[in-house]
Image (cartoon, rainbow, N blue to C red):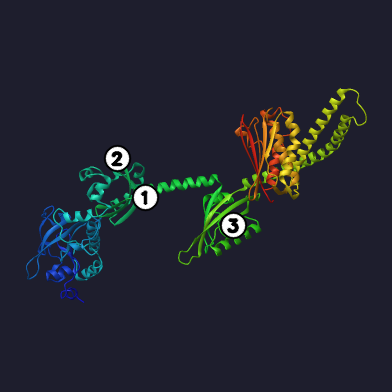
Amino acid sequence: MSLQQDTASVVGTKPTEMMRCVVDETGEVVFASPALSWHLGSNTSEILSRPIDKIIHILSGDSGVPQNIIDIQSGFYDTALQRKGRDPLLVQSRIDNIHLPDGRRFVVFWVDPDQNAAAVAQGAELLSGYESTALELANIASRFVSRKRINQHMHRKLVRETSGLSIPRIGHISQDDGELRHFLNLSNDLLAVYRRDGSFVRVNYAFNRVLGYTDDDLRQIPFIDMIHPEDREYVCVEMNKLTALDDFEEKRVDFQARARCKDRGWRWIEWIQKSIGGHIYIIGSDITDRKQHEAELRLQEQQLSEAQKIGRMGHWYWVVKDSHIDWSDNLYEIFGVKRGEFEPSLKNIKTLMPDEDAQQILRVFRQSIRDASDCVLEFRIRMGPMKELRYIHCEGRCKTDPKSGKVKALFGIMQDITERKCHERALNEAKEAAETAYASKTRFLANMSHELRTPLNAIIGFSQMMQQQLLGPLGNERYVEYISGIRESGEHLLNLINDILDMSKIEVGKYELEIEDFNLSKLVQLAVHMIETRAHEGNIRLIADQVPENITIRADRRAIMQIMLNLMSNAVKFTANDGEVEISCKQGEQLVVITVRDTGYGIPEDKINLVTLPFEQVKSAMTRDHEGSGLGLAITKELVEMHSGTLTIKSKVGEGTSVTVLLPQNY
């Protein structure tokens, strides 16, 4: 097919693509697109090698019209297409002046026959589209152009190579680019064009707003001077990729850097920069908030990592169908392995632990996946060349699929609890040793008490016989007095030994209750009678007129008698002469209430909780002048609690003490 036929094939139908032509330094057309031929009503051969002013007449432009077309500046111009046999077509054309690396120069004309402003390209591509495509078009054309004129064969090849070039379709733009500026200002991104020397050519409103500079400010500030000093070296390296004088190919670089604002603050901007011809086209996104959020997250991650390190803890995440388990850095340290050298997986982790522990992990994980439940377990690992045994506590949670409800992953923490385990073992050993020593002491006291009771009973018995002079008079009255002291001392020692025996039995759990039904009223009256002699010695009045005669209870008779004697004995012991001790009993539906109240010295409030502890009596300054083991209230409290009862003490210094015992009527 001839070139004329090639051109004629498009004459019948109006083409929709841009009209394009390339002019060399002599002002002659070296390339014309089929669309241009169609609109001019000529074939390509009639256009080639003709002066451009015979085809497209330039009427006016932004910078005027030079005498030599090769000196024209890039921009938009009002032009008239000299159509064959018809009136000229008035259109606005885009003209680009292209300088190739080999020194040759070309002028590229673009004409949109529809003048369709709605087809304007978006963003920074408005300007870059023309220049980039013009440069590419000129580069292709230059391979076919020499000092000789282009022939038809070469032009057909040139048409084929340039037919795929895409260019932005820009409609009518006024001389001051008002529509273009308005369109660029719609973007919230920072859009700008600057020359290779860094000086700004154009910026949009977002650029001014975010950084605070006016257009006049930016004319005085090269782009690189806006970059933070700490980022500048890195940015220069990236920009050098764009501004190399011997590289006219389109290139793009992406980087993040801080830009200085007019108020001396800094904003993090994510820059996209593209070099086209002699200009750099940039798009910037303000990512300051994202950077601050990332910094906060890094700080939180660092603090979490430090906290886990202090607690000898790390976290893990395992996708059920995956063999790999994600470990935090602390887990590698806990297991004594290095990241990159050890691949955490169930198979590999098993090699670090005893077989029974490995089986336990598999069993617990399977159950957690099957039941979609949390898991808690402890296992051991062998760490280091000496295979040191360490204890690990593991807790896991399930992550389920929201649709199927099946477990898709397990995640959780692992903590090295070896030190805690060693401490617990030491505590258990110390506890066992203390219990063993205490049991030995208790057995010793019990044995000694039994050994002491036999001679004491003999001493008490013989002293009673001598005091009563059953075998004849002693002769001297002083002997009778001494014998009375021997008997009283023996009885006192026997009481102490009995208290120690009872306390020892209670502490080792060998005090057995013998439960029976009995009349509590009679038991209380008997206890009052037994304590009367001691009360009369101190001129202390015993009051027991609030004890009904028909109260019965099911309990251990001996233990209840000991409770009553201990309470009344303490009340008499710690009440001054001419005081009083009152005993009362009440029967409820299921409880029996026993109260012993005295007008004695009273107990300080901070000491009330201590008086029921064994041997506490001997530590109190208030009671140092009174004999006793200090076990009475301790034994009483234990006996009450053995009956599922409670003992409550209320006291006020200088006014007296009230002890209340609550016992179930049927134990």
Q: What label sits on residue 264 in the rendered view? A: 2
Residue 408: x and y, percent?
Answer: 50, 63
Q: Point out the frontmost of discs 2 and 1.
A: 1
- In the rendered structure, which disc, 2 or 1, sits on the residue that comes first in sequence? 2
Give residue 433's quadrant in the image: top right
Q: Amino acid at mark 1?
A: Arg
Tell me which label, 3 or 2, sits earlier in the chain: 2
Please say whether residue 406 is visible from this viewpoint: yes
Q: Secondary structure at mark 2?
A: loop
Residue identifier under label 1: 290
Tag 2–tag 1 contact (CB < 8 Å): no
The residue carrying pointer 2 sits among few (fewer than 14), some (14 to 19) or many (20 or more) residues within 10 Å by Cα, namely few
Give the residue at mark 3.
349
Residue 415 relative to residue 53: left or right? right
The amino acid on which the numbered mark 3 sits, given as a three-letter code, is Ile
In the displayed structure image, the side of residue 384 where residue 23 appears, left or right: left
Instruction: Give the Cα distance between marks 3 and 2.
Output: 54 Å
Q: Could you tell whether 145 is left or right of 439 in the image?
A: left
